[in-house]
Image (cartoon, rainbow, N blue to C red):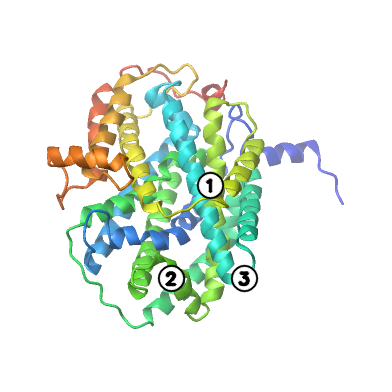
Amino acid sequence: MSVPTTSDHVHQSRTEAPTTLVEAPPRTLGLLDQLGFWGNLGVSLLGFAGALSILTPLGAGPLSLPAAVTAIVVGSLLGGAMLGASLVLGARTGAPAMVLMRGLLGAKASFVPTVLNIAQCLGWAVFELIVIADGLHALVALPRWVCVLAAGIVTTALTIRPLGAIRVLRKYVSVLVVIAMTVLIVGLVRHPAVHVTGSWSGFWLAVDAAVALTISWVPLGADYSRHSRSARSAFSGGFAGYGVTQIACLLMGVVALSEVGRDPNRIFDLFLSLPLGAAAVAVLVLRETDQSFANVYSTAVSIQNMAPRWDRRILTIVIGVLAIGVALTVDIGQYTNFLYLIGGVFIPLSGALIGCWLRLRGAAWNTSTEAPLRPAMLIAWAAGFVVYQLANPGAIPHWSDFWTTAGTRLHTLGHPWLSASIVSFAVAMVIALPFARSGAEEAVVPSPESATAA
């Protein structure tokens, strides 16, 4: 057995994500790595059940099958484009997602979206652990708490070497996922067709739900694309990888829900009843750990925006333990409401971010800890968020009541042609554009070392 040399250790450190934000990120992820990573993230067991928010949008009647299919395609492509654009920023600057917010809002103001992102990442991690545990419980006769614990341990282990995990996903898991999806699709198609009744009245609400599924990854995307070899491969990996697989996942969810009377709790039973369904579900349950892995890892990287020298490995272990504890006690009945609210926060933020980046054309993006406050960008973000809530208040008690009342008085509700996602994104971008250069430093983009140094 050979003994690792110093050069071996240096090579390993250069191919793996640094433990702190004061170190330069290695550029090791190629197009296939990113297609595999984002393609796997686009297929989610949670997404199958989440298709209910497409088929039966909040505040509207059920959609017809053509309307649901169109909403899935339109929403996934719009969300994929937003995701791809955010990945380009990470690839060009070498900065993770929340560090990019320093250039948009200012160093201290970036703590606001950082805290929100930590909350959403932890929430999604908990949701995913519950979904994985439910899948395991349906496959094997183990207590639910054991399944949650097993899912949490695997999730946390993957975060120790994140780039290695992404490469494993690309080489091995992606092939198994394609086979599993094919098995389930063939099985669903061979079932007797179910007629889906409905209209187009809630079309744009369904589009908002599809966009929100994708947009939840925008505040995480640069955490991974900062390791991309090129901006082009980063965009292609996110747009094509995630967009296409989300379309397939949601279409399967719509078909499955139509066959089980739109009861999301019966989807697992339907899949397991299909030929080779148990093996296909087992693959998808195993693959689901990349969802929880990404959320736990990005929670740690987001925390590092406020504490750049903290070791991400220690952070992910603590976060993993916390997610396991919450997953053992929480109810995920408010999933759809959570989805809409997160969309309302990050869709307009993405509009301001992308608009500012396009206006600056990458010539100036201050991601240092001294980046000045940019009030106009905060206003753009806030305006977009308000517009989103007025068009799509969601259904969270008390919170949505206020926005529903305001939207009713302003006549912003009940318009089939109005998409909260598109309008809020556009409003934030339009407000941000004139002020993009105000407060920005006209300089070369800082190196990752100087941009993230404490």
* Image disc number at residue 140: 3
Circle 3: residue type: Val
Q: Residue at x 56, y 44 (%)?
A: 296
Q: Residue 75's x, y, as percent?
A: 29, 53
- Which type of secondary structure does the marked residue at label 1 adopt? helix
Where 189 sits versus 212, above or below?
below
343 left or right of 293 in image: left
Mark 2 or mark 1, earlier in chain: 2
365 left or right of 380 in image: right
Q: Residue at x 28, y 25 (%)?
A: 379
Mark 1 or mark 3, earlier in chain: 3
- Which type of secondary structure does the marked residue at label 3 adopt? loop
Most foreground residue, 321 or 175: 321
Q: Residues within 10 Å of mark 2 (few under 14, many from 20)?
A: some
Residue 19 figure quarter: top right
How far apart marks 2 and 1 lie (CA) works out to 27 Å
Q: Which is in the foreground here, disc 1 or disc 3?
A: 3
- Mark 2 touches mark 1? (CB < 8 Å): no
Q: Identify the residue position indicated by label 2 in the image.
A: 266
Residue 132 figure quarter: bottom right
Where 193 sits versus 405, above or below?
below
Q: Quadrant of the C terminus?
A: top right
Q: Identify the residue position indicated by label 1 in the image.
A: 294
How far apart marks 3 and 2 lie (CA) works out to 17 Å
| Residue 91 visible somewhere in the drawing | no
Where 240 sits versus 27, above or below?
below
